[in-house]
Amino acid sequence: MDNRDSTILKHMLKYCNEIEKTIHRFGNNIEEFKNDNDYKDSLSMKIFQIGELANHLTEEYLEKTKNQINWNAIRGMRNRFAHGYGKMDSTKIFYTALEDIPVIKKFIEEQI
């Protein structure tokens, strides 16, 4: 892994950790999430940032790790936030943060 990819992964890990802290602070109740715009915006922006950072990983790294992590889904989520945030499904955002981010975090920790 080159230095650029390592740096990007470290930034992604920072956002994964921030998502964990946010969930810990606000709770893992879907109804509370749906009714709290600050909670929604906080998780959404951090997920968006992870997707944005994934767009900057080298093609070589993406190709090498594509069987371990679904980079297309991560980058696709970023695109849905960027081009249709108001239409995003709150339930999808919440469960992405709760279920998918820990998987991404574990992958990144193993990589770095």
Image: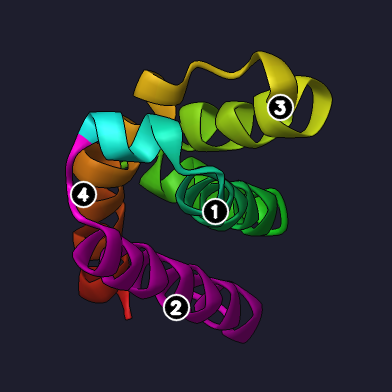
Sort mark 3 into few (<14), some (14-19) or many (20+) by Cα contacts within 10 Å.
few
Q: Amino acid at mark 4?
A: Val
Note whether 72 is above or below 71 in the view shown.
Answer: above
Give me the disc on residue 85.
3
Give me the disc on residue 38.
1
Q: Position of residue 99 (x, y in %)?
A: 19, 39
Q: Secondary structure at mark 1?
A: helix
Of the 4 image quadrants, the one containing the C terminus is: bottom left
Mark 3 or 2, closer to the camera: 3
Mark 2 or 1, closer to the camera: 1
Q: Position of residue 72 (x, y in %)?
A: 53, 28
Closest to the observer: 99 or 3?
99
Q: Amino acid at mark 1?
A: Asp
Q: Position of residue 53 (x, y in %)?
A: 65, 59
Between the residue at mark 3 and the residue at mark 2, the CA separation in whole angstroms equals: 22 Å
Note whether 90 is above or below 5 in the view shown.
Answer: above
Q: Amino acid at mark 2?
A: Lys
Choose the circle earlier in sequence order: 4 or 2.
Answer: 2
> Residue drawn at (62%, 53%), measured in percent from left and top?
45
Between the residue at mark 4 and the residue at mark 3, the CA separation in whole angstroms equals: 23 Å
> Residue drawn at (35%, 39%), measured in percent from left and top?
33
Choose the circle earlier in sequence order: 2 or 1.
Answer: 2
Q: Which residues are magenta?
A: 1-29
Per the image, the residue denoted by label 4 is 103
> Residue drawn at (46%, 51%), measured in percent from left and top?
39
Choose the circle earlier in sequence order: 4 or 1.
Answer: 1
Between the residue at mark 3 and the residue at mark 1, the CA separation in whole angstroms equals: 14 Å
Give me the disc on residue 14.
2
Closest to the observer: 42 or 76?
42
Choose the circle earlier in sequence order: 3 or 1.
Answer: 1
Q: Position of residue 98 (x, y in %)?
A: 23, 43
